[in-house]
Image (spheres, rainbow, N blue to C red):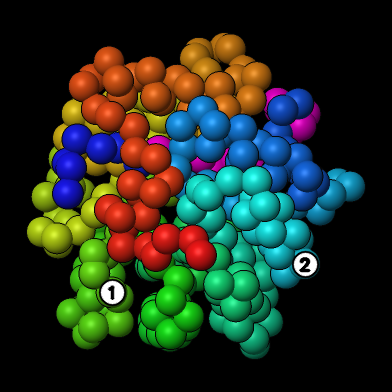
Amino acid sequence: MDDNKIIITAAVTGSSPTKEMNPAVPYTPEEIVTAAVDCCRAGAAVTHIHVRDPKTGAPDFKIDLFREILEGIRERCDMIVNLTTSGLRLAGPDVISQRLQPVSLKPDMCSFDLGSMNFRDRVFLNPPEWGDAAAKSMQESGVKPEIEVFDVGHMYQAIHLIERGMIDDPPYFQLCMGAKWGIEGTVENLLFMKRKLPAHAVWSVLGVQKAQLPMITTGMLLGGHVRVGFEDNIYLKRGVLAESNARMVEMAVDLAERLGRTVATPKEARGILGIPALP
Ligand code: ZN
């Protein structure tokens, strides 16, 4: 494996930014597909997808929206598609099965959050039964889990699943730095998180808002992969809104190349992450 290759993930919409904050935030399936495909052309090998109510832009979780976006991207490029399972606003006795609906579409990857935490203005509940159910569902469906950890304790829960054979090799971690109220996005904290990873893990880092550039830069220097996009940050630099998600990917590509890294194609990223090639 070429350790110099860097996988860039584009998280194009998330659930928080609005068009009032940045008019380029995509809401409709067509807008989200176009944003993802443009990011692929700019150098992103992976796109992380949330869905929105097409009219209001409110966070949504309808399976038809996920399906339309997955199929739309598939028709136009070979990038790795990562569907969220965070379901932060879902509730009810069947919340786990609701959250796992995107896995049934058999995308290449799904995000997998471990560890309950206060998350901005709400509680992000990821109880132990969620961890077991999600790991099992993804393993049985052949969907690569992207283990999102917002603090160091979450990593130990992932290691517990890995030790029980519930996550296939190589385990893939997204170190989520600087989210309210997870671990702060500092260089010292990123070094600490990296040290706690299993030796054979593949890892990527994201930084929320003003932590984005420091965290992806440090991640690039440490040999990690990186995530950018409007889910994490809508500014290209202080006070300057990014015109598009693709513009943020271009920034990350430029930075990576200046730091001596080579951007991985989707095919190369599939090799690094152990995700089968598309038929
Ligand atoms: Zn997300």
In the image, taking residue 262 as reference, residue 56 lies left or right, namely right
Of residues 121 and 51, which is closer to you in this image? 51
Which disc is residue 168 wearing?
Answer: 1
Q: Which residue is mark 2?
A: 64
Q: Residue at x 53, y 49 (%)?
A: 78
Judged by its main secondary structure, the magenta piece is loop
Of callouts 1 and 2, the N-terminal one: 2
Q: Is residue 155 placed above or below 264 in the rendered structure?
A: below
Amino acid marked by disc 2: Asp
Of residues 115 and 51, which is closer to you in this image? 51
Of residues 140 and 89, which is closer to you in this image? 140
Q: Position of residue 86 (x, y in %)?
A: 55, 63
Q: In the rendered image, is residue 70 in sight?
A: yes
Magenta-colored span = 8-22
Q: Residue at x 60, y 62 (%)?
A: 88
In the image, taking residue 278 as reference, residue 150 lies left or right, namely left
Which residue is outermost to the top?
239
Q: In the rendered image, is residue 177 in sight?
A: no
Amino acid marked by disc 1: Asp
